[in-house]
Image (spheres, rainbow, N blue to C red):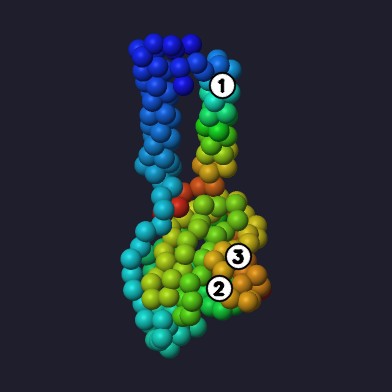
Amino acid sequence: MREVPRGALALAGLTVGLLLLAWFLIFVFVFLPRGMVG
Amino acid sequence: MPETEEGILFSEFRWAIIAVGMVSVIMIALIYAGLVQHINPPSNIETVDPNTLHLTGEFTEANLGTFVEGTGQVTTRIVATQFTFQPQCFVVPANRPMTLRFASPDVVHGILITGTNVNTMVVPGYVSQVHTVFTKTGDLLMPCHEYCGLGHSQMWATVRVVPEDEFKPNAAGMVSCAPG
């Protein structure tokens, strides 16, 4: 683990970022417009 | 790239900050949905005897469907049973708070209403209750979403969301899909 390619960090950051972005897009554009429930 | 012990620790710390930050942002979004948008998991613990469901009490045939109660509260009662919903079609008003109540006399069922956040299990012995506001008019599909037996895929109902001015209860306070 001492030598880690910079690209691996970039790839991990990008994929996690895209996952969070996808979660937010669904939350904002699908989940919230479906309205109140409880 | 981190080659020293300190460098590795810094790298680990940075990722920990990112992970905690992401979880915090998601938690804040969920709290916002719950407190501001009123989107919460339905939670209602209320028991009912599944053996006498159709004979006495709230879920007898005459009480099924949509009713406007004296207070103006709109309540729809539905029985989920192998392999149908009773009634198979029910009317609800648009843009008005209303309550859905479900019960099952046989096995575990589940319902969702397409295009809305209405989604609950229907467990024998309990009344599942969901408060909601339908915002779009039209016919919505309400399938059973918990495998309940061989006829599961044939088990669905229609939710007819009508504008407020077309939501007209009869003398008994009932609104049904049947014309007239």
C-alpha span from label 3 to label 1? 44 Å
The reply to whether residue B77 is visible in this rendering is no
Give, as a three-letter code, the residue at label 1: Ala
Q: What residue is drawn where x is 53% and y is 23%? A: A13
The residue mark sitting in front, 3 or 1, is 1
Could you tell me which chain the residue with mark 3 belongs to?
A: B
Which residue reaches farthest bottom?
Answer: B55
Binning the other alpha carbons within 10 Å of mark 1 as few (below 14), some (14 to 19) or many (20 upward) gives few
Could you tell me which chain the residue with mark 1 belongs to?
A: A
Q: Judging from the image, what secondary structure is the residue with disc 3 in?
A: strand
Instruction: Determine which of the numbered discs, if any, sits on residue B143 in the image.
Output: 3
Q: What residue is drawn where x is 33% and y is 70%? A: B46
Give, as a three-letter code, the residue at label 2: Cys
Q: Judging from the image, what secondary structure is the residue with disc 2 in?
A: loop
Q: Quadrant of the C terminus of chain B?
A: bottom right
Q: Residue B106 at what x, y percent from top left?
A: 48, 80
C-beta proximity under 8 Å, tags 3 and 1:
no
* Relative to B105, residue B108 above or below: above
C-alpha span from label 3 to label 2? 12 Å
Q: What residue is drawn where x is 46% and y is 85%? A: B54
Instruction: Determine which of the numbered discs, if any, sits on residue B148 in the image.
Output: 2
C-beta proximity under 8 Å, tags 3 and 2:
no
